Amino acid sequence: MLTPAVSTVVACEGLTLDVSASTGHGGRAWTSVAWTVDAAALEARAAAAAGAATLAFSPADLEAVVGATVTVTVALENFLGGAATKALAFAVAASPRPSVAVAGGDDVRVLAADGLHARSEAAASGCGAAAGAAGAVTSAWRVVAYVDEAGAALPFPMDVSANARDFILEPYALRPGSRLDLAVTATRGTATNEAAATVTVGRARPVARIAGGTARTASAGGAADAAGSYDPDVAPGDRAADDLTFAWTCADDTGAAVPLADASSPVVALPTAPGVYRLSVGVEKAGR
């Protein structure tokens, strides 16, 4: 493994590549570490790093290859003779580009009730002659794609954030089962950089609720009411028409099953004979 897994570097920042996170050495030093690079101006630096876990390019090294895409390859061999190679290609830019990432990572998972709060972590590069005069870093979000489970395009949701670094969607703005692809561009002066994130909207399990709590004393002819059960994926104002299915079970204090008149209704009549009973209700919607 080569770290950091960069795709673009700024010449004035230099770059140090490291294989320390690689596995397969069995807790011993690598028998052989060989670095190669496809840029002639950097070959001497790679050759000098033979046997070392790191390969460092100075800003002066990278200034010689500005505008090029460089591929570095490292070949490792362990004490058993096992060998592996890893290559990393990166572009070398002259302008000090701002760094940018999506807080929390590029794979975000939410439920419809959560809404979404994505934040850009953008910062200026501290190197280069123009770094101090390039101004503040700004962020700009955009929706790349928004599709349902079948891959059909959906209308883009509306960002309600008042801060350009944030992308905020209100609860229930995203459809359960959908996928939202986002990108954020960080700009400082004329230099830009971009990060992306995929937001996957899961499906919540229905919530079963029996009125009166988990233990109660009831009169003969009373009822147990689970009409307050709900699907968290449905907005509160729309739950009255929600299509939930109910399955009640009842047992007496010996564990024997007691039949109920309408076990598939949200509300069921309680047994008329005095006694202690245990009722439970399962709530389902669309296989959840």
Image: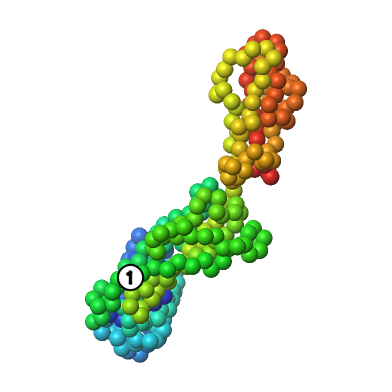
Query: What is the number of callouts on the image?
Result: 1
Q: Residue furthest bottom?
A: 40
In the picture provided, is 133 more to the left or to the right than 35?
A: left
Residue 26, position as x, y percentages in the image: 38, 60
- What amino acid is found at the position of numbered circle 1 in the picture? Val
Furthest residue toward top: 274
Q: Viewer-proximal residue, 167 or 75?
A: 167
Give the quadrant of residue 66: bottom left
Q: Which residue is mark 1?
A: 137
Residue that appears at 55% across and 56% down: 200
* The N terminus lies in quadrant: bottom left
In the rendered image, residue 3, in percent from the top left (x then y), is placed at: 37, 69
Residue at 63% in and 59% down: 148
The reply to whether residue 85 is in sight is yes
Most extreme residue toward the right is: 261
Left/right placement of residue 210 relative to residue 57 reads right
